[in-house]
Amino acid sequence: MTIRLSVVFMGVSILIFGCTNLTEKSDDKLPEIPLSKPQEIQMENLIIRDFIPLETTSFNLMSTDLRIKFDDSNFYVFDESVRDAINKFGRDGSFKGSLATVGEGPNQILALNDFYVDSNGHLVVLSTIGDQSTLIKIKENEPEVLFNINYIASSFTKLSSGDFLLYGSYNFPLTKHRMVHVNNNGEIVNSFLENKYKNKMLPMTERNFFESGDDLFIIEIFNHRVYRYVEKLEGFIDINFEEFSLPSNFWERDIMESFPDLLEKKFASLMGVFSDKGLMLINIDIQGEYESMRKLILIDSDKKNNYIFTSDININNFFHNPIGVENKKIYFYTYQSSIKSLNKNYFSIDLANKIPDKEFDYPVIIEVEFL
């Protein structure tokens, strides 16, 4: 499995460097994709293959702000609005229970910021309180502290060596480097992305690490660059946000001062990078004062082209939240209400029958094929 993913990803790399709707940057030689270059596609190009409703009751109600990861057996759902547990579901959507619950009771943890699931289904979570972060292994639903570290981390990932990468964002002067490499004893062995921002910055919490087979991609807010980590941090590709780029004086101002201007102008930020079997998806969020949209860049090595799909949340959030790519299928999450409001011509009666009416809205995983 690992070798297969590593090999097929070479096709994506070749496509990125060779495709005609990319430009080469002269300063660091990274390829660049301008937002206006990829070929536009419509909903008709995204064929719905399956709906997987997540079993939801009054005990595990979830908001609309979810961080979802999955493996061969399960979906793991972290509600970023509540941050009270990791809800585990089978690939058929059946609810299997809550892990790493937050509280002061037995076998609970005090805070939950991020989580990682290894190839054996073992769960590690990040718990950050004040200026200290703790990595905790959840074994048979019992927490076991791996280490504590005096670093304010908002997200993390585990490397194949057993070490970890922690991300701390722009919280100067508390965060001197936005990312650190930590061994399994909690000792910092390397630092990356020096934090040179010295004005007032709101604490940022986001998903920064995206694992794809042997590849690990890293993104951060207010940065148009996708990084890749292969024993060291390296630039992978730049996205030219064009009219949605940050203003030239952004880093000279306090975020509290400049944010209203950003929203009025609209600005773009990277939200996710997913890839498998020659298909890569880059998720870009565009925020404005009264609107929010997503632009999904699809890099397809079979079609030897790049494509872009625009999702406007004010119209429908059906394809607004991608969570991964597997076997060239794209996975999104949406909600019962969004499916019910969609034109039924987009999916079959058999699929419609998979979405029962419930008194409360519930999340649904969508399996999509790009044609």
Image: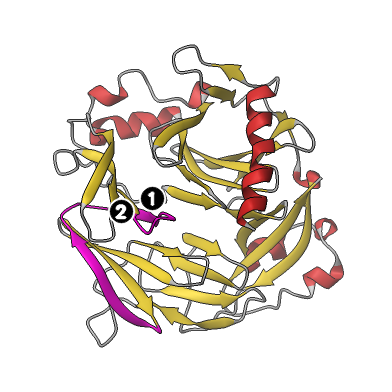
- The Cα atoms of the two marked residues, 2 and 1, are separated by 7 Å
Q: Does the segment drawn in magenta span residue 287? A: no
Q: Is residue 348 left or right of residue 16?
A: right
Task: Please provide the residue range marked out in magenta.
Answer: 140-163
Residue 147: quarter of image: bottom left
Decide which of 298, 44 is in the foreground and name it.
298
Q: Mark 1 points at which residue?
A: 206
Residue positioned 52% across, 62% down in the render: 68
Residue 177: quarter of image: top left
Q: Position of residue 283 (x, y in %)?
A: 56, 42
Decide which of 345, 252 is in the foreground and name it.
252
Q: Position of residue 310 (x, y in %)?
A: 65, 39
Q: What element carries label 2?
A: loop
Q: Mark 2 points at which residue?
A: 154
Amino acid type, callout 1: Glu
Residue 22: quarter of image: top right
In the rendered image, the quadrant that contains the C terminus is: top right
Q: Is residue 168 above or below residue 353?
A: above
Dot 2 and dot 1 residues touching (CB under 8 Å) = yes
Residue positioned 39% across, 38% down in the render: 232
Amino acid type, callout 2: Ser
